[in-house]
Image: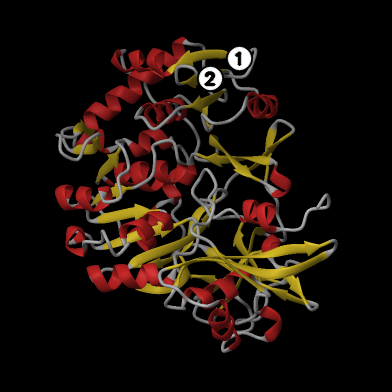
């Protein structure tokens, strides 16, 4: 790597064969190891799990492929999936991709108006939804129970798709609160091998316990499709979430990997319930979605003796910068990825150790085809780079320091402040449990840096201010420290800045 530019690539990307179908790839072990356990679905930690072999899983998917074809779904057609936390979701997702159609996962919580907007954008041919869940008007609808009967039909062959063909669509939040339709190619499934190697350390002998619901794309990729494609075993729990459930599951089923959002690790490590010996079978934990607090991470690592490996990613490319078993505590582009730090207003790479816009090469096989617009996928391209919307800096050896979302930057005293930098400092305080830093309006046209904090132990706001003053420039220190019992979260479990600002900020009518 030239020392004058913040660009990094270590090794070659994972390039699939030109003819490639993501569902066939995911279920390939059904031919070589049909009796091997692919999934144990746990409804009650005290009862026997529901076991699915690779052969069972493939038969259900390929029978469902036949059923969807009988419903008139053709290659290129879009299938909306409005399903809850059941096995119906991954089976229908893989079946749609298997015939060359485009599965589109949607939350069952969406309102009719939101559904109609998405239907206008994407024009689905068919919708499968749970009983009682509304669907867009003028679209053919099947219930999950109807689709479940397809599993026993004669298996259909996998479509002969190209690796570059559209394989599925994921809706993600865009700026201004509008959704964007992210179109991924079939090749994205093969490209996830870079994630296996440099985040999970995943092999065919692993057992992956994932704490997410079936209908969450984090679970679909990390918890199901990656273990299946590698020949590993997946564990998914579908019962009620009690405070001690993840420790109980780990103790009984002996996973080697445990993937969860930071909030789950926070619940697991609470002093009144944390039993580190329950996680003795793990090599490490996996966390993504937002920063994990230092106190939670330290409690986990001290108790279990195992690290939690974090990853940075986005719907458009999944996780591409991560800690790895070979380098915990250090973010680095996964081997095969080409990543750069670009200047604020241009496509030129910055010098090492200089903050800028985090970007990934548009040639990356895991990168989306583009956003659905005007009947096709359009990929934003700045001189061969896709700019992620994150701000970071890169060392000469490729290690990356994350500085938060570009659109989250706060202007204070004429300076730009990354909330993540302030959060990192506060997370190091022994009394702090969770922290979220925002630009809080206090009167018309005036915003201040505010820190919303939950605590492990009592602490005065003045002590938090002093802690920050020892490590931050004056203009970066929060003007307000607001202590709460809990911090609000979005439907996907991420800390919710908008709700905090709406609850605590100045309003024009007050």
| Cβ atoms at labels 2 and 1 below 8 Å apart | yes
Is residue 87 shown above or below 409? above
Residue 18 in percent (x, y) is at 48, 41
Of residues 426 and 182, the one nearer the viewer is 426
Q: Earlier in the sequence, mark 2 or mark 1?
A: 2
Q: Secondary structure at mark 1?
A: loop
Residue occupied by mark 2 = 127
Residue occupied by mark 1 = 139
Residue shown at 55%/41% (left/top)?
184
Residue 101 seen in the current view: no
Residue shown at 50%/45% (left/top)?
492
Of residues 267 and 205, the one nearer the viewer is 267
Kindly report the distance in space between the C-alpha atoms of the residues bearing marks 2 and 1: 7 Å
Is residue 442 shown above or below 192? below
Q: Secondary structure at mark 2?
A: strand
Q: Residue furthest bottom?
A: 470
Q: Which quadrant of the figure contains the N terminus?
A: bottom right
Tally the marks: 2
Q: Quadrant of residue 443?
A: bottom right
In the drawing, what numbered circle is on residue 31?
none
Residue shown at 69%/71% (left/top)?
449
Decide if residue 288 is on the left or right side of residue 249.
right
């Amino acid at each position: 790597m030239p020392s004058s530019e913040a660009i990094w690539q270590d090794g070659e990307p994972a390039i699939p064969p030109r003819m490639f179908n993501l569902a066939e790839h995911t279920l390939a072990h059904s031919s070589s190891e049909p009796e091997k356990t692919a999934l144990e679905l746990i409804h009650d930690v005290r009862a026997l799990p529901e076991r699915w072999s690779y052969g069972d899983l493939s038969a259900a998917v390929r029978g469902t492929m036949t059923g969807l074809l009988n419903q008139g779904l053709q290659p290129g057609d879009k299938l909306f999936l409005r399903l809850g936390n059941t096995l119906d979701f991954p089976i229908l997702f893989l079946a749609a991709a298997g015939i060359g159609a485009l599965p589109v996962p949607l939350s069952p919580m969406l309102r009719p108006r939101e559904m109609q907007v998405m239907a206008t954008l994407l024009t689905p041919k068919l919708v499968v939804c749970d009983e009682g869940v509304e669907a867009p008007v003028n679209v053919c609808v099947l219930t999950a129970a109807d689709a479940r009967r397809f599993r026993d039909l004669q298996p259909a062959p996998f479509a002969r798709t190209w690796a570059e063909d559209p394989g599925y669509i994921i809706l993600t939040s865009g700026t201004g609160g509008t959704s964007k339709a992210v179109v991924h190619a079939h090749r994205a499934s093969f490209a996830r091998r870079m994630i296996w190697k440099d985040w999970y350390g995943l092999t065919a002998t692993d057992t992956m316990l994932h704490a997410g619901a079936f209908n969450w794309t984090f679970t679909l990729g990390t918890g199901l499709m990656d273990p299946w494609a590698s020949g590993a075993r997946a564990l998914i729990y579908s019962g009620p979430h009690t405070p001690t459930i993840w420790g109980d599951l780990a103790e009984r089923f002996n996973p080697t990997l445990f993937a969860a959002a930071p909030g789950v690790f926070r619940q697991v490590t609470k002093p009144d319930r944390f039993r580190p010996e329950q996680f003795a079978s793990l090599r490490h934990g996996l966390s993504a979605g937002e920063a994990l607090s230092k106190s939670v991470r330290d409690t986990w690592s001290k108790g279990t003796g195992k690290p939690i490996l974090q990853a940075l990613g986005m719907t458009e490319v999944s996780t591409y910068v991560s800690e790895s078993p070979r380098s915990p505590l250090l973010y680095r582009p996964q081997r095969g990825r080409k990543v750069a730090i670009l200047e604020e207003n241009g496509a030129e790479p910055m010098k090492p150790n200089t903050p800028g816009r985090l970007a990934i090469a548009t040639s990356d096989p895991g990168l989306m085809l583009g956003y659905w617009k005007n009947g096709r996928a359009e990929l934003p391209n700045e001189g061969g780079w896709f700019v992620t919307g994150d701000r970071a800096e890169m060392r000469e050896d490729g290690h990356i320091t994350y500085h938060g979302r570009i659109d989250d930057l706060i202007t204070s005293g004429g300076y730009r402040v990354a909330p993540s930098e302030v959060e990192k400092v506060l997370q190091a305080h022994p009394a702090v449990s969770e922290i979220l830093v925002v630009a809080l309006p206090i009167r018309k046209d005036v915003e201040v840096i505010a820190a919303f904090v939950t605590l492990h132990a009592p602490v005065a706001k003045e002590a938090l201010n002093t802690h920050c003053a020892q490590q931050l420039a004056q203009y970066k220190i929060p003007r307000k420290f607001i202590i709460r019992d809990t911090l609000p979260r979005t439907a996907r479990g991420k800390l919710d800045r908008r709700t905090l600002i709406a609850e605590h900020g100045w309003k024009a009518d007050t």
